[in-house]
Amino acid sequence: MKNLTVGFHHCLPLASWTQTGDRRQMDSVRALVEGAGGRVVPFSYYDMPNCDLVHAFGFTHELAGIAVECSRRSLPFVYSPIVSLLQPPWARRLSRKLSALLPFDSSPLMLQRLMDHSRLLTVMSGSERAYLREAFSVVDSRMIEVPLVVSSARDLTARDRFLDRYPFLGQVQFLLMVGRISDRKGQLRLLEAVRALKVALVFCGHPAQYELSYFDAFRAGVAERPDTYYLGPLEDDLIQGAILAASAHALPSINESPGLISLEAAQLGCPVVGGENAVLRDYLGDTAHYCNPQDIDSIRSAVQMAMSQGRFQSGLYPKLEPHSVSLQLAAAYHLALGRTNQ
């Protein structure tokens, strides 16, 4: 990637960015490019960059137009879709057929157009590859696996700094949940699942902008249950400190791909509870505890197993380490630069 100039486009405007998993992952990929001697140029649709290739993340209507324009210019367009696997492939296909009857462009058609005009798609795992093949008819030769970047490097002082700020958590074993406060993530379901368990519960994260009533119900639930704490949003170093101090991490989310925080927790040796998510299972295999995120009993059972597991060795997932992912990313860019759309 040395001397390579890469145009970066993300679906979220700068003004609305918070430290979500998508944002942190994009920052990690940017660091890989720059660390290998490349240059990253962020851009919008109205300011197309002078670069060797474009790498885009997520989805907006604007992004579909960028893909078409790159194709017109013969500018390699690499796409990381971060697509939800919750909707069955047949439902994706049906939504496109119905959308074709409308007198205007719609999201299902634009997303397909984006897939069609990408020179190469990076996929997180084999499950996402299979999903894109079935739901969007993307052929295998136009996909390459580039895992998410999750380092096992520890800030040796992070745990102490976290406990210095929250000393009452140094005296108890606690279950941690880091994530935006929203119904999709499932804080209220986790509260209900552990209601009868004798376990301290710690939440961190921003309230979802359009779910303030959910946030109010969440705060009421936290207030009602003993040994339950909402710490608000935390800086990245304190999130790592919280993970290192926790007995387990839970994210009973309905829709994650796969939940970056779950990978970060596992990479640091923290037992993980996650939803029954194919991409998460691709990464963590049997080392995680899976649940039906809409079944309270299932969540409770997974939490009990995770809390009794005990912490394990960090760095068990070498393919997620920055050096390994950097090699995969370089291979993806090399492939994109040497081919035309198929």
Image (spheres, rainbow, N blue to C red):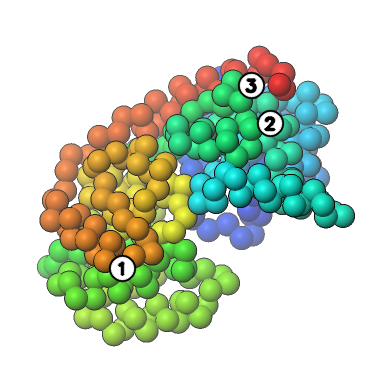
Percent position of residue 250, x then y? 30, 58
Read off the residue under disc 2: 118
Q: Relative to residue 318, is residue 245 drawn left or right?
A: left
**Amino acid type of the residue that numbered disc 2 sits on in the rendered structure:** Ser
Asked whether the residues under the numbered discs 1 and 2 touch, taking CB atoms below 8 Å apart as contact, a structural biologist would say no
Percent position of residue 182, x then y? 47, 68
Q: Nearer the viewer, mark 3 or mark 2?
A: 2
Quarter holding residue 239: bottom left
Label 2: few (<14), some or many (≥20) within 10 Å? many
Q: Nearer the viewer, mark 3 or mark 1?
A: 1
Identify the element where label 3 is drawn. helix
Is residue 42 shown above or below 184?
above
Is residue 204 shown above or below 213?
above
Residue 269 visible in the picture:
yes
Is residue 223 shown above or below 189?
below
- The quadrant of the rendering that contains the C terminus is top right
Residue at x 37%, y 84% (from the top left corner): 220
Residue 336, disc: 3
Identify the element where label 1 is drawn. helix
Read off the residue under disc 1: 296
Percent position of residue 209, x then y? 56, 70
Percent position of residue 320, x then y? 37, 33
> Marks 3 and 1, how far apart in space?
45 Å
Q: Earlier in the sequence, mark 1 or mark 2?
A: 2
> Residue lying farthest top?
338
Is residue 169 shown above or below 252?
below
Residue at x 59%, y 20% (from the top left corner): 141
